[in-house]
Image: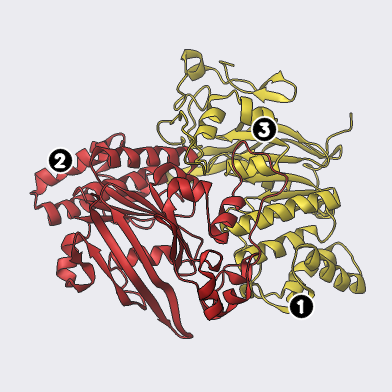
Chain colours: A red, B yellow
Amino acid sequence: MTEKMLEITNLKTYFHGDDGVVKAVDGVTITVNKGETVGVVGESGCGKSVTSLSVMRLLHDTPGEIVDGSITFEGKSLLDLSEKEMRMIRGNEIAMIFQEPMTSLNPVYKIGKQLEEVIKLHLHYDKKEARNHAVNMLKLVGLPRAEDVVNEYPHQLSGGMRQRVMIAMAMACNPKLLIADEPTTALDVTIQAQILDLMRKLRDESERSIMLITHDLGVVAEMCDRVVVMYAGEVVEEADVLSIFENPKHPYTKGLLGSVPKLGQDLEKLDSIPGNVPTPANMPKGCKFAPRCEFAMDVCWKKDPSLLATNGNHTCRCWLYQDQEKILEV
Amino acid sequence: MAAPLVEVKNIKKYFPVKKGVLGRKRSFIKAVDDVSFTINKGETLGLVGESGCGKSTTGRLIMSLLELTEGQIYFEGNQISNLTNNQIRNTRENFQMIFQDPYASLNPRMKIRDIINEPLIIHGYNKGDRMNRITELLEIVGLSAYHADRYPHQFSGGQRQRIGIARALAINPKLIIADEPVSALDVSIQSQILNLLKDLQKSFNLTYLFIAHDLSVVEHISDRVGVMYLGKIVEIADKETLYKNGQHPYTKALLSAVPIPDPKLKRERIILNGDIPSPANPPSGCTFHTRCPLATEICKQEVPKLRQIGEGHSVSCHLV
């Protein structure tokens, strides 16, 4: 029996701007089981990062607000917790790795101090124990000269080293769930390979769950068990990793897979999806993908399809896979 | 055999760094260190490498946007690296550049019409021709004539990159240097731009120098590929040879590090240790020896030369 670690149900996160409401996340449901790596894929503006910030409840400095839905972590509803209770979960049970290792470390504090802060807060170690733990964590993530690095400032480290520090910080309290938001996007390929290898190792050692947010389908293929594809604030397809790559259903997923050049594959022309991602200001009325979809039918322009299971655990939000009767109703 | 369109001979670019009291002590960052290659007419040469390897600097040197420290660059057999600024401006009608960041490379205060108009004015097109040319160019890159009166902020990233391409095409250049033209774009937009670049190459018989860090993108678009590491070309060959039979340990590691979107594929991966050394203080001998899994004594002492090992295939490694 698989144990559910994180359950996001019908999450709606809206941003209140000058030009009205922006529905960044509009009814997203994602489940992460124990020991499972779930990939959340989509292009810029699809709401994948806002989903993760909603889980961590890190939206209070933004005009964003969770207007509906629930987020349950190990049976606890995260949205009902007080800020103080939430702080005990953040970094301790759910940790996050951000995209920009350059901006997510504080430039005026030494690496050691920033790591020890988390350790002291959650594990209640004294100063010496915290320092030892910090050095051990840095060694665990494969940072050379860990004893010296704790006394250095972020600017003295390279991008790859900073991302290792971020991972060490996220892992310091042995969290049950790790949310990684584009953890390797800012890194070079050979460094990316090191970091992915490290994340795989850390995952396999203990039964840790990972929610991996990325736009890189190669990273998804290598790391994930299950994949959620998002488009314009909605989940459009969800399946295990093999089904997504071998038998994609949604035209957007198909287009996305066809757009990526693969090593060793000589094609004259890449498939491409025409048009652009819709902006929140001119979101299409029916299916949000209809204006770019080559299979768009009349019904697609009228009503947004619901997310339906096509077989087993493979779900897809597309009129092509819905009941004929339902289409006639519209 | 026809003469190559561009020939780059032993070019070097050292950036001075001031150190010490009063900045008297000078050291150099060797951004490009003795690079030579040729680009033939109608082909696409891809330059790949990780950040700081000197691929962008190489592109800027060919554009004469930076001054060479040493070496020569020839365009259609004529040396362009010793020209004055005015002379360079006249030769630039032969080569144009597409930049990485479509948000930063278009002037936000200029209408699209004026952005595309500028190279036409500089290279002496008359007014009537210019307006027709602008409309024509917008249609070539997949935009419409009415877009000419808009400002850059009214366009998405992919559309802006199309405007950048229209500007580069304006004066019918022979060579286009594209510096990471798709790396700032979303995946679905990236393929639109790559297809557009391929189509344009066919219709206008263009030659590309395509600079990128993404090996899959470079494989898709290039005919020949050069791999750079710390200011040097470590391997250069035609695409098939390089991707199927790359000889340099760095090429092999780089290729094995690329995540491939196919979950069934299980590969033996070469994971390099450590980071790229700083170009201000490169390692002795072969600059790759600090990360190379095969390094021997000689690699630490002697700089390997770029040697030809096959038809159009050159590698700089002691062990090959």
Instruction: Decide: is A177 above or below B249.
Output: below
Mark whose residue sits in front, 1 or 2? 1
* Amino acid type for the residue under numbered disc 2: Asn
* Residue A150 image-quadrant placement: top left
Depth order, front residue of B267/A327: A327
In the displayed image of the protein, which residue is found farthest to the front? A325
Q: Which residue is mark 1?
A: B146
Callout 2: chain:
A
Q: Is residue B204 left or right of residue B264?
A: right
Report whether residue B24 is seen. Answer: no
Mark whose residue sits in front, 1 or 3? 1
Q: What percent of the width, then of the height, locates residue A15? A: 40, 78
Callout 3: chain:
B
Marks 1 and 3, the one that precedes in the sequence = 3
Q: Is residue A208 left or right of residue A126?
A: right
Residues at circles 1 and 2 in contact by the CB criterion of under 8 Å: no
Is the residue marked by circle 1 packed among few (<14), some (14-19), or many (20+) residues within 10 Å? few
* Amino acid type for the residue under numbered disc 3: Val
| Tag 3 secondary structure | strand
Q: What percent of the width, then of the height, locates residue A72? A: 24, 65
Residue at x 46%, y 36% (from the top left corner)? B276
Q: Which residue is mark 2?
A: A132
| Tag 1 secondary structure | helix
Q: Which residue is mark 3?
A: B35
